[in-house]
Amino acid sequence: MILSGLEIAKRMGKDIDIVPYNEDQLNPNSYNLRLHDELMVYDNEVLDMKVENKASKLVIPPTGLKLEPNKLYLGRTIEHTRTDSFVPMLEGRSSIGRLGMFVHVTAGFGDVGFNGFWTLEIFVVQPLVIYPEVEICQIYYHHLNGEYDIYQSGKYQNNEGIQASKLYLDFEN
């Protein structure tokens, strides 16, 4: 089952944290998260799963930044989230999707215990001008049945910003 917006609000500061929190971003069964003004793009056209792929940062000015198709942009949410009791899930907003923008290619599923900013895997179907602080996606929370271990030491836990892929670490074992 998914938590209602009112239930999310009721649990704020207890077993759900969203910082900063703004009641105006609360929906009937989710909470809108905003786009930070920083993006990251990979430097090389060909990426390799077994190595750390270098990336460069871009800043989205208040006047907007045009994104190009066939290019992956990594962004992040302004909001930092944490929960030890629910499975957090991320989805794009329908208004964003209707502009041909995807905010997560595959990574909309969070782990119970995730603590950090959400890295967004942004892709556009056609050129699109984006702006910082836009409500770009929504987080919602699922109940978890049965005993579980809290996510504590993953590659992306307690992040402080945009996280490029760390898949190469899986090959070091």
Image: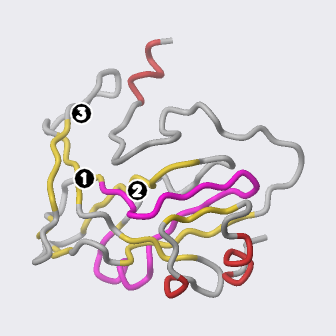
Q: Is residue 132 left or right of residue 13?
A: left
Circle 3 residue: 47
Residue 55 vertical position relative to residue 172 in the rendered view, above or below? below
Label 1, label 3: how many angstroms apart (C-alpha)?
11 Å
Mark 2: secondary structure: loop
Looking at the picture, which amino acid does disc 3 mark?
Leu
Element under disc 1: loop
Q: Nearer the viewer, residue 13 or 93?
A: 13
In this view, the residue in front, 39 or 169, is 39
Q: Is residue 56 magenta?
A: no
Query: Of the residues under marks 2 and 1, which one precedes in the sequence?
Result: 1
**Quadrant assignment for the N terminus:** bottom right
Amino acid of disc 2: Val
Is 43 situated left or right of 115 in this image?
Answer: left
Element class at badge 3:
loop
Q: Which residue is identified by label 1?
A: 72
> Residue shown at 71%/80% (left/top)?
4
Determine which residue is flagged by label 2. 105
**Quarter occupied by residue 9:** bottom right
**Which span of residues is magenta-colored?**
75-101
- Measure how far apart labels 3 and 2 are at the Cα level: 16 Å
User: Callout 1, which amino acid?
Assistant: Leu
**Mark 2 surroundings within 10 Å by alpha-carbon count, few (fewer than 14), some (14 through 19), many (20 or more):** few
Separation (CA) of disc 2 from disc 1: 9 Å
Of mark 3 and mark 2, the one earlier in the sequence is: 3
Q: Earlier in the sequence, mark 1 or mark 3?
A: 3
Residue 52 versus residue 99 in the image, above or below: above
Tags 2 and 1 touching, CB below 8 Å:
yes
How many labels, in total? 3
The image quadrant that residue 153 belongs to is: top right
Q: Position of residue 65 (x, y in %)?
A: 12, 69
